[in-house]
Every structure is written in C-alpha cells, then in structure tokens.
Amino acid sequence: MTVLRLLTCALLSLCLACMPAAAQAPSGQAWPSRPIRILVPYAAGGAMDVLARLLAAKMQEQMGTPVIVENRSGAGGNIGADAVAKAAPDGYTILFNINGHAIAPAIYKTLPFNPDKDFAPITQLFTTATAFVVLPSLPVRSFQDFVALAKSKPGDLNYGSTGVGNSLHLTMELLMRETSMKMTMVPFRGDAPLFQGFMSNDVQAAVVPTVAAKQQMDAGIIRILGVSSTQRMAGLPDIPTIREQGLPNFESTGWMALFAPAGTPRPIIERLAQEARTAIMAPDMAPRFLSFGVDPVAQGPEALDALYKADRIKFQRIIKEANIALQD
C-alpha cells in the first residue's frame, strides 16, 4: 500500500509539473481578478475604436472577465501610449495601437515615454491597408481621374489627415510625390472628425484605413478610388489597387497590435496574446474582421517586436526623404 501511495504521488507530481503555470499578477494573485482596460489612443467612433470593441467583447466572453475599451486621443496617439507606458505592469492596462506607434520616435522631437524601454509587445492583431477616398460629388471615377483633376488645380484641393507624420499622412505624401499632385493638408483628431470634414466639404480627399472607408462608403459619405495593398482586398473586391492605376510599384500596408507596459510578467503577456489571437481567429469573428477590410494574423510577442523595430527604421527613412518637419 505504501508503494502504491508513493507511485500515485509521483505520478501526480509529474502531471502537475507538466501543466502550464497560471498567469500571476505582481501581487501573486491569480490573473485576471479584475477588469482589463484596452486603451485606444484615438477618438471614439473611428476605425480602431470599432475593432477594439469587437476584440474586447470576444476576449471578455472567452475570459469571463470584463474587458473595457477606453479612448485616450491626442498628440498623434502619444497621450494614450504614454498612459500605458506609465501604467502598472500588471496586465490590466494594455495599448491597442497602429503602426503609428513605430512612426512616433521618428516624427516627434521628444516623447513623454521611451519607445525602446517602456513597452512590452503582446501580439500583432491585423495587417491593414489604406484606401484613397474622395468626395462623391467630385467628377472623378478612378484614381487617374483624380490625379488629373488635382494637377489641373494645384493647391486648390484639400486632403484630410488624422495627424502629421502618421502612416496615413505618409502614404498621401508618397502618392503626391509619385504623381506630382499638390494639395493642402487639413489635420483632424480622428476618423470621425475627418469624415465630418468631408460632409462639410472642408476636404475633398484623404487616405484612410480600409475599415473606416468601407463604413463611410456604405453611408454615401465618400467614394473609394483605390487601395494601397498589392492585391485587391477580400472585403473590397470591386475596388482596384493603386498599382492597377498607374503606379505599379506602389504599396503601403500597416498593422494593429497590442502592447503592455514594460515589466509585465511574461505569463500574463503570453495569456493576453493567446486570448487575443483566439478572439480574432474565432469562426464567428474572423469573417467580421475581413468584412472591415483588415486581415487577422496570429503572431507572438517576438514577431511583433521584430516588426516594430523594422518599421521604426523604415519610417525614419521616409520622413527624412519627404522633408517632413519634426513635431513638438
């Protein structure tokens, strides 16, 4: 009987050793034990806000813990990013950001956070493309039509941008350089205010995320003339690429990802990455994300870290070549 007990205990110990360790908060409590906040560093109602809320709802369903989206807009996304950088590294405050997070170190003279040391990558969520959109009342039906119109009225047309030096602004700058168009930029604090600018005719064109473009196209507020990806988007199969319309080498894609404050315990990082990837790849969610014009991806913290570092180098070069002034 003693031998049997010893064997039973040994087997039990072996099984326990093989089980994955539960995520632990710095306090030693099981994680999560309270609501998780996802900070979106842009205005409510925009493309990122919509996607973040879909993600949060699915993660909440999976985890049985409230997952709340909070908007902290301003300073090109830096206010929200700074709030996460300075949050407790306990997994309860995370950042949902675009590749503008990799642009900020190249476009701003100073930042309130250290882009190299203050964040821990969790996972990339989506690969994104952008759409070139115009006011529906303009007499154009293609990207080439618009280029011809803009070149016939140099400086007379306005384009909207949700920030100086973000990926949308840089994409428009590249398009203008490639086509010799000249337009005047009008800045906005987010997608929703930008589309109000279309409704008031303050702007006649913009480069916007495909998720926002599809929504506003369906509402009749804008017309999509082209997408920046190398191939047509699954959610916008009738919209030609910019490549198809006279710029055969043009491409501008981006990403959306989750970051945590530096120092967040690795088991919590891995749990968040797993839950997020499971959420975006779920059979009832992946088609919804595709319909918004974003492609879900499932990559871990290391892949996101490599992508973030590579994009920082790339955008620094683009900003320098475009002679974009550094922002305060």
Image: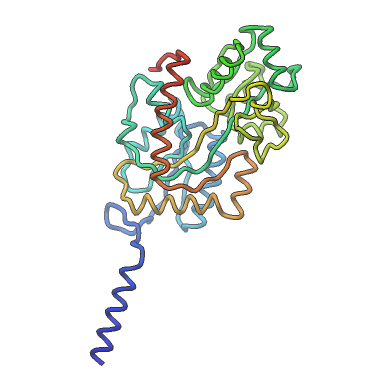
In the figure, 71 relative to 155: above or below? below
User: In the rendered image, which quarter is residue 27 located in?
Assistant: bottom left
Q: Position of residue 49 (x, y in %)?
A: 53, 38
Q: Farthest front residue?
A: 248
* Near-viewer residue (174 or 48): 174
Q: Position of residue 129 (x, y in %)?
A: 58, 33
* Near-viewer residue (124 or 310): 310
- Residue drawn at 54 percent across, 23 percent down: 171
User: In the rendered image, which quarter is residue 222 located in?
Assistant: top right
Q: Position of residue 125 (x, y in %)?
A: 50, 43
- Residue drawn at 69 percent across, 21 percent down: 143
Asked if residue 222 can be seen in this view, the reply is: no
Q: Quadrant of the C terminus?
A: top left
- Residue drawn at 54 percent across, 18 percent down: 173
Asked if residue 238 can be seen in this view, the reply is: yes
Q: Quadrant of the N terminus?
A: bottom left
